[in-house]
Image: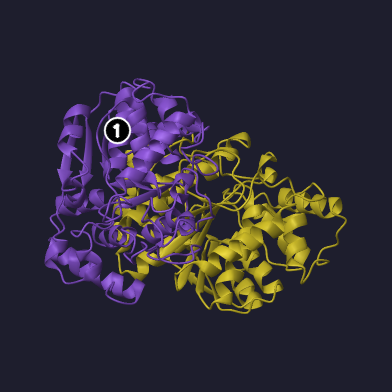
Chain colours: A yellow, B purple
Amino acid sequence: MRMLLVAGTTHTALIDGISAAGVSPEATRHTPVADTEIVAFGQPVFAPEVPVSPTGCPTPALITRAIRERVGFDLLPIDAGLDEPTAAPTYSLGNGSGGDIRQPEPVPNAETLFDGARELAYALPDDRLLVGESIPGGTTTALGVLRALGESFGVSSSLPDNPVALKRETVDAGLDASGLEPGELANQPGAAVRLMGDPVLASVAGIIAGAAERWAGVTLGGGTQMVAAAALARHADVEAPLRIATTPYVANDDAVDLAAAADGLDLEVTITDPGFDVTDHEAMTRYPAGEAKEGVGLGGALWLADNQGIPMVELREHISTRYVGLVGTNGQ
Amino acid sequence: MRMLLVAGTTHTALIDGISAAGVSPEATRHTPVADTEIVAFGQPVFAPEVPVSPTGCPTPALITRAIRERVGFDLLPIDAGLDEPTAAPTYSLGNGSGGDIRQPEPVPNAETLFDGARELAYALPDDRLLVGESIPGGTTTALGVLRALGESFGVSSSLPDNPVALKRETVDAGLDASGLEPGELANQPGAAVRLMGDPVLASVAGIIAGAAERWAGVTLGGGTQMVAAAALARHADVEAPLRIATTPYVANDDAVDLAAAADGLDLEVTITDPGFDVTDHEAMTRYPAGEAKEGVGLGGALWLADNQGIPMVELREHISTRYVGLVGTNGQ
């Protein structure tokens, strides 16, 4: 199995308090680079440090990497608008980050990203593709896309207290800036992601479309950002089966009605519980407490591990060892 | 172990009869793309076909890939001037192919390539690096660099009959075009590769330099092109230990005095015999007969397999299976 890890940037993440994918809004620009390097190499290489949330919770990339070491999946990092150079080899789709969605057209190259991702996914030899993402601020742009398309599903957050009001306000400002009413871009996914989305959403939607054209199976490893990507594909009339593999921390999030999204968008949902609530390793116990929750393909990696029959207790042990090696403590 | 596969292009390969890395000189432009995709994915993806020599001998990339499937080494493809898009994720060092060495300055961006490769190799977390290459025409540019540096070692060929006279004539024309006498650029490796080399040689030399700065071990998986890269590093006063891992087909090549190169450049040479002479699979028996010989990290991959104690008979069996799957015949 190969994971396409789609990494990019949106300036929406610079809004104070909107993202936990960095110790500060300014630090989030390094996060997708660091995440990609961590999954590719096991540690940051050009990125300055392991990304942590404002409260010190380390990036899910560490967990995805630890799972990769046990499961052995291939990695295809995709640069969908990184803002900094990465040492990881990447398939490059675009250049430059996405803008703040409160601008009229935050993703002017959305069509190029979609088409490039579709071309790649169509050409790859794999019968099944797993997709992950890393883009700080991505749940807000996901909400923007869902509102533009007229889908009413809520979105999750990497913060323990989802800043729902701030996200809504940001999306409302974005709709205003683009001169849009909610739902006005139903069945116009290209415009929806160009005016209200981010470069990663455009690219993931393109991967779904390209894989569908050759009947390759797609599993989206992630939470509500992947719901938004799936919505874009459905509004582009992609009818192929689609699976979302996520964590219980997204599924149990009160802000999210995953069952409604699955039903409305015809998605198969797989939830893999890594049992982080039965460990005393604080970096893992933060997940059931509502921090991080998902990201960097975590739900997909857990699904692969479960498919291979790797016991979760073994996986937690390996995650713990790798954490200590990289962060230097047990995450406290 | 991670293999840095440095792939690029030189227009020197367009000289009729100089390279076997393609069915025709024009076809060689696709070869490094196809080689990279084959090692990364097991088959060409954007590249139009599996590269074959004018006599139908398939690229060593197939063998390196088959070995990778058994050994499980990581791959970091490096784009050092590819002429066509590749589906493989790459670390991109440069843009555009190298020119024909009969031009005055075939690699104007040599310093950028060297510095970029050095920066990457210095930053990577690996204690040891394995380096491979794919660049049609590369033994001729290797000869050009060796002559400019004043090193007298000969170079091998992917053709069964090494076109030595044509290579010498090309190098002489290159020296003339650059206004150089043989040996004039001793201790000036930057100028030697800029005026008489190719983008892959500049990049491999940079990798050697960057790894040496942090005492990481480097194994060059390849033949006389790697000797030229090592010569560039030695002329840049890099004194760290260096190993070349190659095949017996290079070591036994009368055009090459590998022992003299090893002695003159202080290289440890490891030769791993895959026993292709005891198989009846024609694609493998062509190697002892003098075709292909080496390339796309083959000698390095064999060395890794041997280090892991994988029996060569098992490896040959797997190579044979993969050949049939991809080329559709047993290579005849």
Image quarter (top left, top right, bottom left or bottom right) of the C terminus of chain A: top left
Q: Chain of mark 1?
A: B
Is residue B114 in sight in this rendering?
no
Look at label 1 and name its amino acid: Ala
Residue A68 percent location from the top left of the image: 36, 56
Residue B75 percent location from the top left of the image: 36, 51
Taking the spot 28% from the left edge, 63% from the top edge, the residue there is: B66
Residue B91 appears left or right of A137: left
Q: Nearer the viewer, residue A291 or B139?
A: B139
| Secondary structure of the residue carrying numbered label 1 | helix
| Quarter of image, res A322 | top left
Taking the spot 35% from the left edge, 26% from the top edge, the residue there is: B182
Residue B165 appears left or right of B263: right
Is residue B250 in sight in this rendering?
yes
Q: From the image, tell me which residue sits under label 1.
A: B230
Residue A140 appears left or right of B322: right
Residue B1 appears left or right of A3: left
- In the rendered image of this protein, does residue B238 appear above or below residue B74? above
Residue A236 percent location from the top left of the image: 70, 72
- In the rendered image of this protein, does residue B187 appear above or below residue B245? above
Taking the spot 28% from the left edge, 61% from the top edge, the residue there is: B63
